[in-house]
Structure formats: C-alpha cells, structure tokens
Image (cartoon, rainbow, N blue to C red):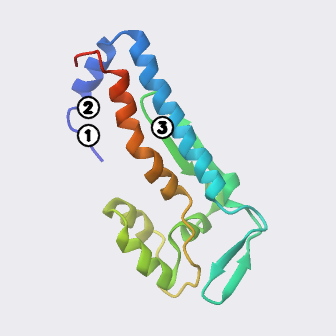
C-alpha cells in the first residue's frame, strides 16, 4: 500500500529535534512489541484444543511460538508476523476454515479479506476461527497515531 506524501513527511521528520525523533521511534517500537505480546497470549500453544464443527482437536505445535516482530532500521515502522515454521495453520486458526471463515472473513476490512483469500482451499474445512493476531492489531492500532501526535504537540510540521 503506497502512502502519499511519505517522502515529504520523512524530510520534515528528519528536521525535528533528535529527542522528538527518538520519542516517535520508541512509540512505534513499544506498540509493535505490545501487539506481538498480545498476539502470543491470544494464540494457541502446543497441546491446546481448537474447536471444529465436529468437536475439538489438539494441536501439537503451538502457533504462539511462531509470532515474531521486527522494527525497521529507521525505527519508523514495525511489523508483527507469523514465521514460516507455522505453515498455513496460523492462517487457518486466525480466519477459520469452511463455514467459519465464510461467516467471519466478510466482516473484515478488504485488505484482511485479501490475506485470508490467499489461504482459501475448497470451503470445506471444519476449523472454527480463533483470531489471535487481528484482535491485537485492532486493539493497539488506534493508539499509535494519538501517541505520536502527543509527542509532536509542540512541534509544527
């Protein structure tokens, strides 16, 4: 997704006092790590049971151990991700499969629907959704901009 005016914003950001720049970078790092921590807490661990349309099924590998985070070299963006070792199971748990996914995915923003669509197989799965990453994102995303605005309160951009 392209951000209009990003280059201009970056030039202005670089003109801010170093203290303000560091405050903004700290906010981005703190919020990124908060999303990661919450996603780990929400995600199923090894031995946990997942709901299916036929009951429950234990998982051998915990998804929680595959949730990573990184901060860009500039410190101005963060990413929470599922490591490759989790395979497709993480997406199936997040969005559900079959009827569960068919009911849940349309309620999401189009960009999340597009991600879920990448994991669509045949619509016959039985796994009930157990969102862990999106709830963490939805909880923390609205707080980032207000925190940055507060850090910039006395600075004219």
Q: Position of residue 29 (x, y in %)?
A: 52, 31
Check disc 1 and report its element: helix, strand or loop: loop
Find disc 3 in the rendering and name its residue. 78
Find disc 2 in the rendering and name its residue. 6
Q: Residue furthest top?
A: 17
Contact, CB < 8 Å: mark 1 with mark 2?
yes
The Cα atoms of the two marked residues, 1 and 3, are separated by 15 Å
Rendered image: mark on residue 139: none
Q: Nearer the viewer, residue 148 or 125?
A: 148
Crowd tier of the residue under label 2, counting other residues whose Cα lies within 10 Å: few below 14, some 14–19, many 20 or above: few
The Cα atoms of the two marked residues, 3 and 2, are separated by 16 Å
Find disc 1 in the rendering and name its residue. 3
Residue 53: quarter of image: bottom right
Q: Residue at x 31, y 63 (%)?
A: 110
Q: Position of residue 16 (x, y in %)?
A: 32, 13
Residue 15: quarter of image: top left
Labels 1 and 3: the sequence-earlier one: 1
Labels 3 and 2: the sequence-earlier one: 2
Q: Nearer the viewer, residue 82 or 134?
A: 134
The Cα atoms of the two marked residues, 1 and 2, are separated by 6 Å
Crowd tier of the residue under label 3, counting other residues whose Cα lies within 10 Å: few below 14, some 14–19, many 20 or above: some
Is residue 140 visible in this depiction of the protein?
Answer: yes
Image: 3 above or below 53: above
Image: 148 above or below 157: below
Q: Residue at x 61, y 55 (%)?
A: 84
Q: Nearer the viewer, residue 121 or 97?
A: 97
Q: Position of residue 6 (x, y in %)?
A: 26, 31
Q: Is residue 132 left or right of residue 153?
A: right
Q: Is residue 8 left or right of residue 114?
A: left
């Amino acid at each position: 997704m392209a951000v209009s005016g990003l280059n201009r914003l970056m030039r202005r950001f670089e003109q801010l006092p170093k203290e303000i720049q560091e405050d903004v970078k700290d906010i981005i790092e703190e919020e990124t790590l908060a999303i990661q921590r919450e996603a780990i807490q929400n995600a199923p661990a090894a031995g946990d049971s997942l709901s299916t349309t036929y009951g429950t099924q234990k998982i051998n590998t915990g998804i929680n151990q595959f949730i990573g985070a990184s901060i860009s070299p500039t410190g101005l963006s963060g990413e929470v991700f599922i490591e490759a070792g989790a395979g497709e199971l993480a997406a199936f748990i997040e969005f559900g499969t079959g009827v569960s996914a068919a009911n849940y995915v349309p309620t999401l923003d189009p960009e999340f629907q597009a991600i879920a669509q990448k994991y669509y197989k045949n619509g016959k799965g039985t796994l009930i959704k157990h969102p862990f990453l999106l709830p963490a994102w939805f909880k923390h995303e609205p707080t980032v901009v207000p925190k940055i605005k507060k850090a910039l309160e006395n600075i004219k951009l």
